[in-house]
Amino acid sequence: MPSNPSLEAVSAANATKRKNAPRDDEDSASESGSDVSMINVDFDFYNLNPDVDLIAVKRLLRQTLSHDEERINVHLLAELLLAEGVRLQAGSSIKTDGEESDPWGLVTVIDIVKHKDHPALKPFLEYLCSTLANNSNSPLQSIFNFSSPNIRPALVFSLRMLNLPLPLIPHLYRMLLEELEVKEEGRFTHFIVWGRGYKLEGTEEGMGLDMNIVEKSSKKKKASGNETVALSAGSFPYHPEEEFMDKASTLPYECAISVDE
């Protein structure tokens, strides 16, 4: 029996959106005598599809909002998010089993000024603005001043499964910007990119992770000889691309969300 199966992602160097066409799902037979089984997976890019993607988008929103999802009507927000993708003809999803399958991830935007009073977006904007209440001098306050004719911000939703291959993510943003550039409705002054991270105080231990150090010179491994390493203090993103966003952004900002006690 083949051992050590691995997942090989097809290169997305020339990524384009796939038309809804028949797929060849035949698996190639592994070479006889090989001790490694290789599986080729096609990650295809599609336009957002409200009829197919709604349930998966709701699940990804709940995953990202964590316990604060109780403050947001996730169903209405997911519907608006997908409807905006259709209206602006911008935004993409990544799937592996055709257009009718669930997306592994997606990137799209919502026009904040146009939908600021929408029952789906208004609670979400209030949720974001509430985090600025104790920081009235933050430059972000001016961006949330929707009465200014010179400011037209867009809220970027980047939702994905944790195991989606990282090299695919830049193509989602590239295609989004290319699609927005050709639309009058897509000419925004600011992009507000939000995501979830975690913060450590520096007093936490490995909590089950492989964070123990064992003396290499010791011939006998004893439980009492293990040294538990405290994790470094700081704020960390869940997704590697969000660390790049923090460095590239004009106004990085972080706030606390609800957590279990």
Image: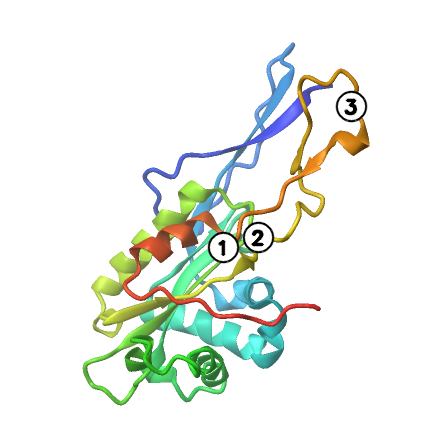
Which residue lies under the disc numbered 1? Answer: 234
253 and 33: which one is in front? 253
Relative horizontal placement of residue 113, taking residue 120 as reference (left or right): left
The residue carrying pointer 3 sits among few (fewer than 14), some (14 to 19) or many (20 or more) residues within 10 Å by Cα, namely few
Residue 169, position as x, y percentages in the image: 41, 48
171 and 27: which one is in front? 171
Relative horizontal placement of residue 222, taking residue 67 as reference (left or right): right
Estimate the spatial distance between the alpha carbons at disc 2 and disc 3, rounded to whole Å: 27 Å
| Mark 2 or 3, nearer chain start | 2
Residue 6, position as x, y percentages in the image: 59, 29
> From where the camera sits, is residue 18 visible?
no
Estimate the spatial distance between the alpha carbons at disc 1 and disc 2, rounded to whole Å: 8 Å
Circles 1 and 2: CB distance less than 8 Å?
yes
Q: Quadrant of residue 178?
A: bottom left
Circles 2 and 3: CB distance less than 8 Å?
no
The residue carrying pointer 1 sits among few (fewer than 14), some (14 to 19) or many (20 or more) residues within 10 Å by Cα, namely few
Residue at 61% across, 72% down: 258
Residue at 33% across, 83% down: 114
Q: Amino acid at mark 3?
A: Lys
Residue 98, position as x, y percentages in the image: 52, 49
Label 3's element? loop
Q: Quadrant of the C terminus?
A: bottom right
Estimate the spatial distance between the alpha carbons at disc 3 and disc 1, rounded to whole Å: 32 Å
Which residue lies under the disc numbered 3? Answer: 221
Q: Amino acid at mark 2?
A: Gly
Q: Quadrant of the N terminus?
A: top right
Residue at 45% across, 43% down: 166
The residue carrying pointer 2 sits among few (fewer than 14), some (14 to 19) or many (20 or more) residues within 10 Å by Cα, namely few
Kindly identify which numbered label has been placed on residue 170.
none
Which residue lies under the disc numbered 2? Answer: 202
Label 2's element? loop
| Mark 1 or 2, nearer chain start | 2
